[in-house]
Amino acid sequence: MNSSNLKTFLTSNVDMDEQIIREHIENLKKIQVKKGNFLLRQGDVCKHSFFVEEGLLKYYSIDEKGKQHILQFAPEGWFVVDRESAFFNQPSQYFIEALEDSVVTMIDVDMFASLSLHNQSFALFNNKLLHNHIRHLQNRINLLLSATAEERYLDFIRIYPDLLLRVPQTLVASYLGITPESLSRVRKDLATKKHQKQ
Amino acid sequence: MNSSNLKTFLTSNVDMDEQIIREHIENLKKIQVKKGNFLLRQGDVCKHSFFVEEGLLKYYSIDEKGKQHILQFAPEGWFVVDRESAFFNQPSQYFIEALEDSVVTMIDVDMFASLSLHNQSFALFNNKLLHNHIRHLQNRINLLLSATAEERYLDFIRIYPDLLLRVPQTLVASYLGITPESLSRVRKDLATKKHQKQ
């Protein structure tokens, strides 16, 4: 099995000798995760960033009433990691679970920082990756504070264009911070608007 | 005027020659910002990180109905920057405004990345700073999705222990994503609980 997606992702984003990238990638462990299996559970310390080669992961918390709250979906080509746990060595508040049978490359949490110290291009890339993560999180906070259910849903489609058919509506609603009933209304309203335009 | 808070912050967090830090700090522009004045407006491209030496800033969006939504407060010793605008060269969606008369050091947005390329200790520090930012944003998203108004309020007090007397209740409510009425109820309930314990 080759770490093809991660290699493609890195070689197309980092101005770094392909041979060096290949050497680093080849040493990484790639695992198969069956739907419903966990890569991280609440209470564990997160030791890896997970890069999704195939499949789909969900990253979520469970509140005291047992309700799931989705922090992130990670389809093919996405990273997911609990940075609080991994980089500050704390027990995680979250779970990472396979929503579909998946293939995942496990990246030691120090690898990106260590590569950054030895290669300036990689350092700039890693910096950009972190800033990109921050802008997405900040945008999500702004939407949770200020946007209507419809605006949040449209943003979801923009970020995850191919997930609507792969993720149960209850989980989409959970990601958006709205009720499943409210999500149904939004979808119905949008379908009506689209129909009226035609 | 000396950039004393920023210098102290850096020398106590980065294993880097104090002389080098001082040289970088001395070149930075420090400005006074009167209460109600802006460091960034929606539509501008953000060119600086702002480090608050004295005073208090608010970082917020305004929705279509003219309502403010607080992304962050920045009291003494905090940084604030619109990373989406600054690092991806986009017009900002946000405002940065002085809530009190403030003194602010302006840091060119590339300075931290550039220092990171020349000093490994600074690179590790900058990396930690970005990860710390990410964990706070993620925690906030989790609270907005899953926590009660009381839990969000208690988290606010933990993060900003000295801001309750400096920030109007309407802005605290806006930060928490709850109504001012709900915030009043939470404060009343907590005061009753505290009274009952005594």
Image (cartoon, coloured by chain):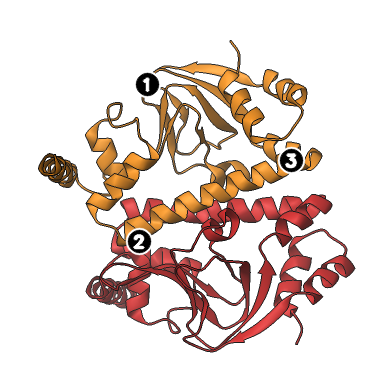
Chain colours: A orange, B red
Question: Callout 3 environment at 10 Å: few (<14), some (14 to 19), or many (20+)?
Answer: some
Q: Give the residue pinned by disc 2.
A: B151
Q: CA distance from mark 1 to mark 3?
A: 34 Å
Q: Where does the image place residue B73, in percent across and percent down from the top left?
A: 48, 72
Q: Looking at the rendering, in which quadrant would you find the C terminus of chain B?
A: bottom left
Q: Residue at x 60, y 34 (%)?
A: A47
Q: What's the chain of the residue with tag 1?
A: A
Q: Is residue A136 visible?
A: yes
Q: What's the chain of the residue with tag 2?
A: B
Q: Residue at x 73, y 50 (%)?
A: B124
Left or right side of B89 for A17: right
Amino acid bearing label 1: Glu
Left or right side of B94 for A187: left
Q: Looking at the rendering, in which quadrant would you find the N terminus of chain B?
A: bottom right
Q: Is residue B198 above or below residue B100?
A: above
Q: Where does the image place residue A131, in percent across and percent down from the top left?
A: 58, 51
Q: Give the residue pinned by disc 3.
A: A121
In front: label 2 or label 1: 1
Q: Residue at x 75, y 73 (%)?
A: B8
Label 1 element class: loop
Amino acid bearing label 3: Ser
- Whether residues under marks 2 and 1 lie with C-beta atoms below 8 angstroms apart, the answer is no
Q: What's the chain of the residue with tag 3?
A: A
Label 3 element class: helix
